[in-house]
Amino acid sequence: MPTDTAEPGPRGGVLRHDHPPDAVGRVASLGLTTPQDVFGLRRSAQQAAAAVALDQQDQVRLATALSELGRDRLGCRGLEVVFALDTSAQPMALVITFVWIGGPPPAQDTLDLAAKLVRIEHEAGATVSRIVVTQPLTAPGLTAADVRARLVKVLAGGARSTEADDLRAQTRDLVAALEETRAQREELLRLNEELEETNRGVLALYSELTQELETTNSGVLALHSELEDKRHQLLEASEAKTRFWTNISHELRTPVNSVVALSALLLAPSSPPLTGEQREQVDLIASSGRTLLSLVNDLLDVAKAEAGHVDIHPQPVDLRLLFAHLGTLLLSSPNPDQVTLVTPGLEQQPSLVTDETLLIRILRNLLSNALKFTERGEVHLDVAVDPELSQHAVLFTVTDTGVGIPADELGRVFEAFYQVRGPHQKGRPGTGLGLPYARTLTELLGGSLTLTSTAGVGTRVQVRLPDLGREPAQEPDSGGSDHAR
């Protein structure tokens, strides 16, 4: 059971100390009966706030709120103000409670004013009413015992307070508040100046970045314009090359045909007999004419293909007849006795709708190339439904055991007129147009041509052709396997 001790209050009321405290333990209480008691309450509240390390503004707020509430309740029967410490709150709080019996309710204006300064709760009872003011304490390093000891010390002593003392205290509080406001205003002005300086720096940086961006954009536009000009120049050069090839091929074909035909007439049995030397010279003329005619035909075919002037006529292809026709190519092989041409048999072959003439040209170029550079061994032609796509595509594969292509030249064999140099070229004339022509025709048919090769081992060329008589299938990315010969 707590025991109460009473002594004259520092401001003219009765100040009581309660021992020991509970969680919300009383520290002291003050009775309010005269205006001097209200002045003392203000002084006690401000000193208590300073003792528990509240800042200047919180001290003034608490003292003003208690003073206004005390002045409003003055005259109520049994009016008492109890100072207590709530150690259960987080953070702990100073709790000041006004308690009275009966009397009129507090003025709403006073409650509203106090609520703007501190946290309050009004409890109106049938006999006893209360107003509870709560002020959280955030003093670092102070325990509940320290805070309680400070409050007891402050609230236990002091002189009586008069109205003049209270006015002087309010004046000091007002001066302190004005001084703090002035300091805050000066700090705000300083911060505004720093912010304006920062804004000027940001604007300068933004302006600089904008100028750099505009310069970069101008450079990009100039580069784009230059690239567009280069593209037009390349297109014009390509068109000019195509026109040149087409025109020169037409112009050369007539005289070359005449040379070949006249050579054949001179060598015909019905022509006047030639001496051995004359016959040898005419044979040389005829051979050169045929070579030149082949070159002219290749040039014309490539020019048409690159210009897109090749008409495509899809139709069902009988692959068995096509393979039988291609089998005769072995007769023109440089080494027919040492090379075997293996083509698919007469069994059922995959169905395919495409341009048969262009397909024959593609496979003839690939097989002729393989036979030309294979001294001994085999040249295989295989056909199958392409497993990488769908049943709507057919895969043709030409494999040889020839000289192969060095790895550093695989990337150039699809360039027009390029030929891999070496001893294998001796006695094997060519134009270097066969592979580019075959790839161009394959692409015109909607397919793809890939090549892999190992020097001294052989070469494999794969041609993927879609079935033009069915819905097109999605083609996979040939990726790194797309080499050239």
Image (cartoon, helix red, strand yellow):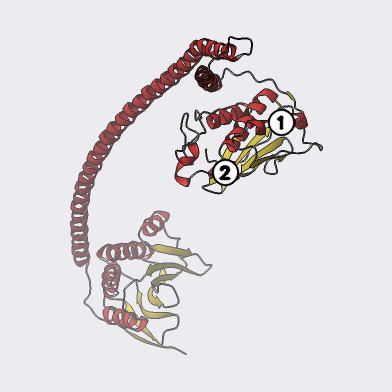
Q: Along the polypeptide, which appears first: circle 2 or circle 1? A: 2
The residue that disc 2 covers is 402
- Looking at the rendered structure, the kind of residue marked 1 is Asp
Percent position (x, y) of residue 238?
Answer: 44, 21
Vertical order, 392 against 454 (above or below)? above
Percent position (x, y) of residue 413?
Answer: 49, 36
Residue 342 or residue 288, whichever sits in front: 288
User: Quadrant of residue 161 in the image?
Assistant: bottom left
- Looking at the rendered structure, the kind of residue marked 2 is Gly
The residue that disc 1 covers is 467
Q: Is residue 100 visible?
A: yes
Percent position (x, y) of residue 112?
Answer: 40, 55
In the picture, measured across the screen, residue 444 lies left or right of residue 95, that is right
Count of marks placed on residues: 2
Vertical order, 307 against 329 (above or below)? above
User: Quadrant of residue 63 in the image?
Assistant: bottom left
Kindly identify the residue that appears in the image at 59 percent across and 35 percent down.
Answer: 334
Q: Residues within 10 Å of mark 2 (few under 14, many from 20)?
A: many
Observer-side mark, 2 or 1, equals 2
Kindly identify the residue that appears in the image at 41 percent across and 71 percent down.
Answer: 97
Percent position (x, y) of residue 355?
Answer: 68, 24
Distance Cα–Cα, label 2 vs label 1: 31 Å
Mark linked to residue 277? none
Vertical order, 257 against 120 (above or below)? above
User: Quadrant of residue 349 in the image?
Assistant: top right
SS under mark 1: loop
Q: Is residue 307 visible?
A: no
Residue 54 or residue 192, whichever sits in front: 192
Q: Residues within 10 Å of mark 1 (few under 14, many from 20)?
A: many
